[in-house]
Image (cartoon, grey):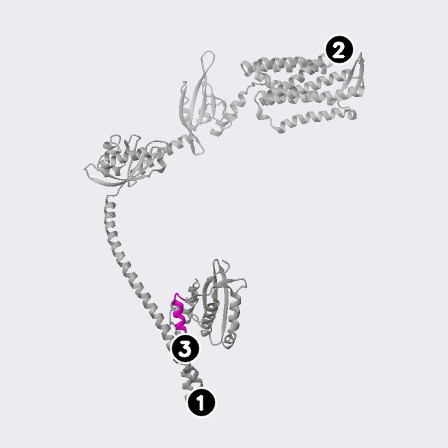
Amino acid sequence: MLEVYEIYFALLILSGFISLNLSFYIWWRYWLEKRVKPASVFALLMVSVTIWTFASALALINQNPSQTYFLEQFKYIGILFIPPSWIIFSLQWTGRKNWLNKRRIYFIYLISILFLILIFTDSLHHLIWSSIDYVQIGSYLDISVMHGIGWWLILAYSYLLILIGTVYLVKGLLNLRNIYRKQAIILLLGCLIPWIANAIYALNISIIPKIDFSPSTFIFTALVFSWGFSQFRLIDVIPIARDAVFENMNDPVFILDIKNKIIDITPSAQKILNCNATEVIGKKVGDAFPDQHNFIKQLGEEKESQVEVCLFKKEQNFCFDMQITPLYDSDNNFNGRIVVLRDITDRKESEEMIRKSEAAYRAIFENTGTATIIVEEDDTISLANNCFQKLSGYTREEIEGAKKLNFFLASKDSERMKEYMRFRSGENKDSAKKSQELQLVDKAGNLKDILLMIDFIPGTKNSVISILDVTAQKMVLNELRDAHELLYTINKDLERKVKDRTARIERLIKQKDEFINQLGHDLKTPLTPIMALLPIIKEKTEKFEDKELLEVLNRNIYYMRDLVNKTIDLAKLNSDKIEFSIEDTILLSEVENIIKNNHILFEENNINVINKIDGDILVKADKLRLNELFNNLITNSIKYTLEEGGTITFDAKELGDFIKISIKDTGIGLTEKQIDHIFEEFYKADDSRHDLDSSGLGLPICKRIVKKHGGDIWAESRGKEKGSTFYFTLINGKT
């Protein structure tokens, strides 16, 4: 008996080392280097075998019962990872990867892990081993156990997985050919020997009943697999199952027997024909698809053929290229046919679009309204439209393929056109002009001025040339050139006359301003003593009637003085010699001073003043002229305020490089006609036309001041009795 244990122990050690080396070889050779998917699972399978064999060997030589018990439990890590690894490998090897997803793989291994938990907690529930006895045989310590219900569940689970994996391999053995069949035989041999040994132990029919020879038989498995790797590329080349190929074909495929009954059909064909395989397999094509007459008609002959068919689906036609291949048995008897459909709907639609595009192109080519030709690389005209026929006087038959472009050009242009076309076809074609002005000779010998617009057709060396007959335009251009020369002469003479007239007007304006200035001084000289003496005379006069006459005289004298002063002021503002002292001015400070200086005038006329101007607004202005501008506008607003009083509002806003300033009143307002003329010299609103307090020069002076500042001034009003707003702009001091 001792000799048996010694042999058993030696086989375990040898089996473990071979399995360990084989697992490392598979992992390195086929997974790390080649990334063959089944290799990782196969390596895990061999690692599990290694754990089982080494744990069994260590448990046998260990003399400590508790450690032996632990090793007996530990070996089940290998035992329980073999069945799930085997079935996963079998499914991968036979090409049934669709069934394998991460959730199912995790679930299979999770069951093994749950069984492992039961094994390592067996001392608490004894579901795995109901009793354990230790038997000492020489230097070996063996275990004699009574298996519990949990152990039998593990056995059933393991056998079920191994059986399923083996069934798939057997199916592969029956369906595969050549090297793949030999690979399947090797895998089955490697699996069956340990499985049979384990079944003998589990059923207690071994001639040595207490020893489980299953792990030791893996030495045979490892050797068989090693032979398979060296001779038949066991993992390197794996078969692809017929189901995997057939089920995943993109092209619709039918397999028919000699009576046109459907034997098999791919999912893609089911989708195209809106059917289910279980409904149509076994039926004749005509019965399964009664509406597909065109398709059924092509299946009548035995010979190999390739035709285009249309299948009707959901009120739409789909076009297919149908390849029919007859099937023959080993005696060369007709056995059925394979029908493969390739969807050419998009191609047919593209062909139809091309056909329509060609028709549209021909219609456009013929009806552009411009003479158009297609010129080949050798300058031969291959296409000419109706307009070119009319232009040249030749028929299409006389032109297309018969004449070159230079045939139609005047002799002086022929060589120039050849040189141009050579340049256009060279490296500098992008820099060449796309148009040329030449002369064409028609069939009657008439010369016609033409404009050629030339471009190359992409992907070819052919040119498309559009030709415009510009003979009439050339005549018009010549007439226009003559007219232009005449107009140029007239224009030069007119410019001279305008220049002379402008100089004369400028002299007259200068004389006027000098006259007004001199007149003003001449008038101011006698007015000064009169204005000084009239108040004295008025004081010495006792009669009331004389005093009233003197008052009228005094008022008119003051009106004349104001008129003279403003006339002189306006004349100065019209002069280019006057200079403004422009400086950065805080607008709010200036306006507040002006309001303060006019407060008595505001109070006498019951005027409420509102100042909305911000303190940070800065303008470029002559302060003296700015005060004059505001005083004139304030005087104008007060003058036309209603008798009961009103409101004057000052405001200013930034508009980029300018400041927009407004003075708004609630006075009598303005009409559109008045707004159009209000800044004209001596113009008065109707209500004050005969008012001696108004000279009609205040607003024109305001306009000159604003213009001298580089700004603009205007007025707005919503109409009579609705007030007026005067706006003007000054340069922003912040720019």
Q: Quadrant of residue 462?
A: top left
Left/right placement of residue 115 relative to residue 724 reads right
Q: In front of the other: label 1 or label 2?
A: 1
Q: How many marks?
A: 3
**What is the three-letter code of the residue carrying label 3?**
Arg
Q: Residue furthest bottom?
A: 542
Mark nearer the N terminus (1 vs 3): 1
Label 3: which residue? 561
Q: Percent position (x, y) of residue 326? A: 44, 18
314 sits left or right of 385 in the view:
right
Q: Which residue is mark 2?
A: 6
Residue tagged 1: 540
Mark 1–mark 3 distance (CA, rounded to whole Å) = 24 Å
Q: Is residue 560 above or below residue 438?
A: below
Q: Earlier in the sequence, mark 3 or mark 2?
A: 2
Residue 688 in sight from this viewpoint: no
What amino acid type should be assigned to the residue bearing mark 1? Lys
Against 42, is 10 above or below?
above
Query: Is there a contact, CB below 8 Å, between mark 1 and mark 3?
Result: no
Residue 249 image point, x, y percent:
50, 25
Q: Within 10 Å of the Cα at label 1, are there few (<14), some (14-19), or many (20+) other Cα atoms?
A: few
Position of 485 relative to 524 (above/below): above
Give the quadrant of the N terminus.
Answer: top right
- Label 1's element? helix
Q: Nearer the viewer, residue 238 or 429?
A: 429
Q: Please identify the dominant SS of the magenta region.
A: helix
**Alpha-carbon distance for marks 3 and 2?**
147 Å
Q: Which residues are magenta?
A: 561-577
For marks 3 and 2, give the one nearer the viewer. Answer: 3
Residue 432 shown in magenta? no
Question: Furthest residue to the left?
Answer: 444
Q: Are marks 1 and 2 in contact (CB under 8 Å)?
A: no
